[in-house]
Amino acid sequence: MKTWPLLSVALSLLLLASGCSAATTTGGTGRLNVVVAFYPLQYVVEQVGGDQVSVTSLTKPGVEPHDLELTAKQVASVATADLVFYEKGFQAAVDSAVDTEKPKRVLDAATIVPLRTTPGFTGEGTTPSTSALDPHTWLDPQTMIKYASAVAEQLSQVRPASAAVFQQRADALVKELSTLDSDFTTGLAHCQLTVFVTSHAAFGYLAERYGLEQVGIAGLTPDAEPTPAHLAEVQKIAQEKGVTTIFSETLASPALADALAKDLGLKTDVLDPLEGITAQSRGNDYPSVMRSNLSALRTAGACQ
């Protein structure tokens, strides 16, 4: 008979523990599970969500995001996420996972900043299965500012009790990104050369924002093969405009950029499209890599 009170206490504790474990991340205090498509989106969510989010990127460090393929486990993670943040039209595998798994809350970056064709880009290197719409909106810091506000709103809807915290962190991120935008505006205001040649046409939004002109060796994807006629046109522009530097990037082969630079007797440097952070990146986060890009552009353009 003396064992019954002990058994009752044990059962009560078990039920209490079961109730706690059943609490959802939405209403509880556990971390919200956020799945993002690639690095810049990851950076924004981590900065706005802080210790209230657990962020999983579908594009692992060192993986070229344009050609991403997902494992079954990654596809399953989309279905169970509290929030999925991706850019429709950029990564076909992610688009398919979102359409198939139908996560409960989705934020599409292309609805925050609509994709458009890159000024001066005619579709060189695209195929019938790819789009001439430029997905690289995040290379404009003002786009990232818009992302920060949208993420804060979405996280606040998932967890209203933390809305003030999310907004405070978003405001801090917006302040940092606004400073970065100002640095680009000032740093690229007085350049002797405003044309730059890069391995693939990822910098259209950045170029348009700061009064530069991008010339891409490849198209909107780094593995697009430029035609001989296009390569000849790039060489002609580089010579006519007095280009000093041919830019390659960290996640794609520099072979074409290096070959073009060698043919023209020009220098090479790195301009990072920030599709991922690796040990080879010139910085450990979005702002630091962007400032490395700014420094490279200022040097190549002989900016005052």
Image (cartoon, rainbow, N blue to C red):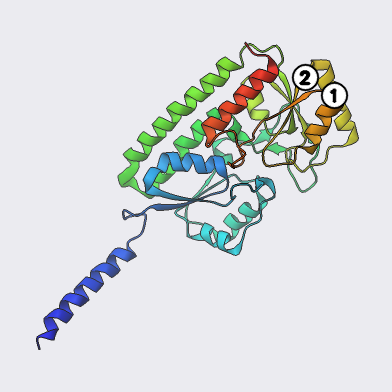
Tag 2: residue type?
Val
Q: Position of residue 15 (x, y in %)?
A: 25, 72
Q: Position of residue 11 (x, y in %)?
A: 21, 77
Instruction: Give the image quarter of residue 219.
Output: top right
Quarter of the picture containing the N terminus is bottom left
- The residue that appears at 83% across and 23% down in the rendered structure is 265
Residue 175 appears anywhere in the view: yes
Residue 209 visible in image: no
SS type, badge 2: loop
Describe residue 94's horizontal placement relative to residue 172 as left or right. right
Which numbered marker is on residue 113? none
Check whether the beta carbons of the residues at disc 2 and disc 1 lie within 8 A of each other: yes
* Number of the label disc, if any, that sits on residue 264: 1
- Return the mark for residue 243: 2
Residue flagged by tag 1: what amino acid is it?
A: Leu
Q: Residue furthest bottom?
A: 1
